[in-house]
């Protein structure tokens, strides 16, 4: 009876430590980590986790449900980590007992479905995109679009605006950029993970927006760049803060990040949209991983080990799908941040 009680106590201790992480009850069994949130970062986490399980035997189960869902689930303690493309303020983190750290630099772009218009052939500006999403510019051959695209045969088609239907950090990044270039957008709509959209139809996740744009002639939507590459979507070039026409690219995202210093920002709270520089991509951003300070130490140790592996061994995989690696100084600061806040 005493032995049985001892065995039961040990098993209960293991279950208490694993929590949302789901550690197996035997010493040699693989660990399974569960995370949820950003659809933006899903291609990167999927690529990293496929290799990580081969290297370590540890399975990463990531649910691509949107940043709003990821924030809600990590606050509820139902996952080991949440992912958001909108950073939480230091005040919100402290109130909820959370920490956050950046993962990789990326960007998003406008995609369209226009007969006869090739990828990269269409040029847009931030103020023009804001007017499209405000419902003020309704047709593709509108003079405002034609002015930026001389020589391009724009169809006389109605514009179908596609946006996210779920809580989305991709939406926050997009809306934050529009708020910087359009006073009307800032006053009427603003920037958050969920918005009261003036016009349009909603798709769930980057996947949903991409699917709608592919199916609806005359449509326009915003998605993370990896989805553009994966689905071979027609993408727009943009006029950046310096007035230069640029294409989405890893270099352009990194140029945006070069204008901020993650290491000097409390809880790594930085925004990358609308940064200066002739080669800078204007709708650049980052994904943050969010952890609970009160989670079992074994949980947070396994989560940080996975992302540490990504920082050290997963950068070539990240670059292959246009996710930019964090500077070494930022990675060093993240590790110090883990030690200070989690004791690991």
Image: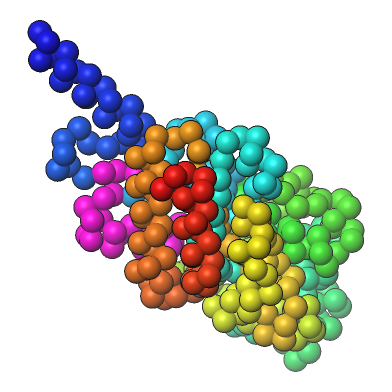
Task: Report if residue 217 is visible in the image.
Answer: no
Q: Where residue 46 sits: x, y (%)?
A: 38, 58
100 or 336, nearer to the observer: 336
Q: Is residue 265 above or below residue 93?
A: below
**48 is within the stretch colored magenta:** yes
Q: Which residues are magenta?
A: 31-59
Q: Where residue 16 sits: x, y (%)?
A: 33, 27
The residue at the point 28 percent across, 49 percent down is 59
**229 is within the stretch colored magenta:** no
- Quadrant placement of the N terminus: top left
The residue at the point 38 percent across, 68 percent down is 312
Q: Is residue 178 above or below residue 191?
A: below
| Left or right of residue 28, residue 116 in this image | right
Q: Is residue 25 above or below residue 331?
A: above
The residue sitting at the top extreme is: 1
Task: Report if residue 26 is visible in the image.
Answer: yes
258 or 240, nearer to the observer: 258
| Left or right of residue 284, residue 157 in this image | right
* Image quadrant in which you'd find residue 152: bottom right
283 or 11, nearer to the observer: 11
Q: Is residue 298 above or below residue 62?
A: above
The residue at the point 71 percent across, 78 percent down is 238
Q: Where residue 161 sits: x, y (%)?
A: 70, 59
């Amino acid at each position: 009876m005493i032995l049985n009680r001892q065995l039961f106590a040990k098993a209960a201790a293991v279950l208490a430590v694993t929590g949302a992480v789901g550690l197996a009850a035997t010493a040699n069994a693989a660990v399974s980590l569960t995370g949820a949130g950003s659809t933006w970062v899903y291609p990167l986490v999927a690529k990293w986790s496929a290799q990580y399980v081969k290297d370590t035997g540890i399975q990463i189960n990531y649910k691509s449900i949107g940043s709003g869902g990821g924030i809600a689930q990590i606050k509820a303690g139902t996952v080991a980590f949440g992912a958001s493309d909108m950073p939480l303020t230091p005040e919100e983190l402290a109130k909820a007992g959370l920490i956050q750290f950046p993962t990789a630099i990326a960007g998003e772009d406008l995609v369209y479905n226009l007969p006869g218009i090739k990828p990269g052939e269409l040029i847009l500006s931030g103020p023009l995109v804001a007017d499209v999403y405000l419902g003020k510019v309704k047709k593709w051959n509108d003079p405002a679009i034609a002015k930026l695209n001389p020589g391009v045969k724009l169809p006389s088609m109605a514009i179908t605006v596609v946006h996210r239907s779920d809580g989305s950090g991709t939406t926050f990044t997009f809306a934050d950029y529009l708020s910087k270039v359009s006073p009307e957008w800032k006053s009427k709509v603003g920037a958050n993970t969920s918005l009261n959209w003036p016009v349009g139809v909603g798709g769930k996740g980057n996947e949903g927006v991409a699917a709608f744009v592919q199916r609806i002639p005359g449509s326009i939507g915003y998605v993370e760049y990896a989805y553009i590459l994966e689905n071979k979507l027609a993408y727009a070039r943009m006029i950046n803060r310096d007035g230069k026409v640029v294409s989405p690219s890893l270099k352009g995202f990194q140029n945006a990040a070069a204008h901020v210093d993650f290491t000097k920002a409390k809880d790594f709270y930085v925004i990358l949209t609308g940064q200066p520089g002739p080669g800078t991509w204007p709708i650049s951003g980052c994904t943050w991983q969010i952890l609970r300070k009160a989670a079992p130490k074994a949980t947070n140790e396994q989560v940080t080990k996975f992302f540490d592996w990504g920082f050290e061994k997963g950068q070539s995989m990240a670059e292959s799908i246009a996710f930019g690696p964090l500077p070494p100084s930022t990675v060093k600061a993240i590790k110090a941040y883990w030690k200070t806040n989690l004791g690991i």
